[in-house]
Image: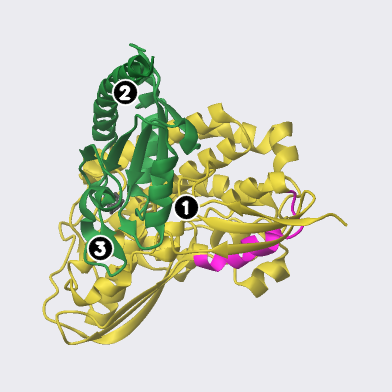
Chain colours: A yellow, B green
Amino acid sequence: MGKRSIIPYGPQHPVLPEPIHIDLVIEDERVIEAIPSVGFIHRGLESLVDRRDIHQLTYVIERTCGICSFGHGMGYCETMEDIFGVEVPKRAKFLRTIWFELSRMHSHLLWLGLLADAFGYENLFYQCWRIREKVLDLIEMTTGGRVIFSVNKIGGVLKDISPEHLRLIDSSIDDIKAELEVIKKTFIEDSTVQSRLRGIGIITKEQAHALGCAGPVARASGIRCDMRKRGYEAYQFLDFEPIISDAGDCFARCYCRLMEVFQSIDLIHQAIGMIPDETDISIDVKGNPTGESFIRIEQPRGEAVFYVKASGKPHIDRFRLRTPTFANLPGLCEMLKGAELSDVGLMVVTIDPCISCTER
Amino acid sequence: MAKIKKSPWLLHYDGSSCNGCDIEVLACLTPIYDAERFGVMNTGDPMQADIFLITGGINTQNAEVVKQLYNQMPRPKVVVAVGVCACTGGVFKDCYNILGGADTVIPVDIYVPGCAARPQSIIDGIVQAVELFQKRSDEHDKEMKNKGREAS
Ligand code: SF4
């Protein structure tokens, strides 16, 4: 038996831009235990509820995370709409769906790039980010922002997408699809990538279930969970099936996310085909509501849970958010046990950690 | 060292940002915006870095980390605060855990505004930082020379 030593991993390290700190207890080259410590990005965002009114809060909550900002804003608005007891116009639902899927595409492409970088394919990293820029261009064209686009409001959306822009999105995502087909080959077929990802960091279905994993991590272990199937916004009208793989290793997680980009493209096509030709994109909500609500949505990283308690005052009483990365961290710690030290970076990347969501 | 501005190295650290600015900083380094054409290179090692890009505000836990990273960088060095969070604390200014912008713990030279800061303005910040870095290193050289003369 070798000597045990502890290697501190992070908070400043080259794999992720975000600070995550893990103490790795290793014996020779094997990780025996992984102890995460958090708090480097904790801001105390949820405490702002007593200083910002319900409408201003939309913009604060959106800044929980810059990668899935649209989803956070939308989740909060949905929760408030539920408390107000209003239903947003149908066109707004479709617009939200289109933007949400675009942001899922940009999030997954970003992740694919980071993964490529983690296994040493720098060019592939650049290719993913180049394609991602095209998605960002579409987002910028329709909303004016690149990563934080603040188009949600309680009761609908702030901006409409013109028919020309819808057509342009429709054709641009086909171009993106064609380019994706090229990089897909490398991710799925390249033998070096395979040897780096297959059989590494396995989470079985039972483990994933017991540890409460969410999103692509759970789906890659064969659990059929996708909150979009709940049918919020326009998902009730769209036809899709969650993408599942059952190997539960790094490759499966890569596969799931890659295929979800294609799925998003398909969903946007469907949504654009079905979007109603109305002028109403939002309804006015007035007053200070009373009530509690609880909403679950599917973020790019998995299921996010929003909770709001309001009691008739200009400020809500409590806002709470359970983020997908928080659900996936136990999975990561399990995965790291017994791993080779050189695979640690790769495993951390494959759960797609978003620390700023988790610590808020 | 007249041409040092052709090759400074960048260190990026995410304070308590929301990620929005981080991914824009990363996007700057990819071929579309390609900040590397100004000679800068991204590094993960503070000991080799000349320009420190910091995103996000300072909170009680990362204050020490930021100070440490800054102190580990060799002189001369330039600090660029990217995004309103790093400039002043931004939307999170009133949060209980936020002490303020990056300048609460380290001296900041260049402030890049925006939430999220656009790649164009980040590149502008980098270009200004490169100029400033050249100036500082000239001064540093002079100082060293003078010291050498005094000693001999
Ligand atoms: S300035 Fe805005 S986008 Fe940048 S880290 Fe702060 S909240 Fe996020």
Q: Classify 10 Å Cα crowding around label 1: few (below 14), some (14-19), many (20 and above).
A: many
Instruction: Tell me the quarter of the image containing the C terminus of chain A.
Output: bottom left
Confirm whether residue A215 shows in the render.
yes
Task: State the image coordinates of residue A11 (x, y, percent, origin top left).
Answer: 50, 52
Q: Can you identify the residue that label 3 sits on?
A: A60
Q: Return the residue found at the far front.
A: B152
Q: Classify 10 Å Cα crowding around label 2: few (below 14), some (14-19), many (20 and above).
A: some
Residue in the image at 54% along x and 61% along y: A215
Asked whether residue A329 is drawn in magenta, I would say yes
Q: Tell me the magenta residue range.
A: A326-340
Label 3 resides on the chain identified as: A
Viewer-side label of 3, 2: 2
Element type at mark 1: loop
Q: Which mark is residue A19?
A: 1
Viewer-side label of 1, 2: 2
In the image, A305: left or right of A165?
Answer: right
Element type at mark 2: helix
**Residue A52 versus residue B147: which sits nearer the camera?**
B147
Q: Is mark 3 within 8 Å of ligand 1?
A: no
N-terminal label among 1 and 3: 1
Task: State the image coordinates of residue B96 (x, y, percent, origin top left).
Answer: 28, 70
Residue type beneath disc 2: His
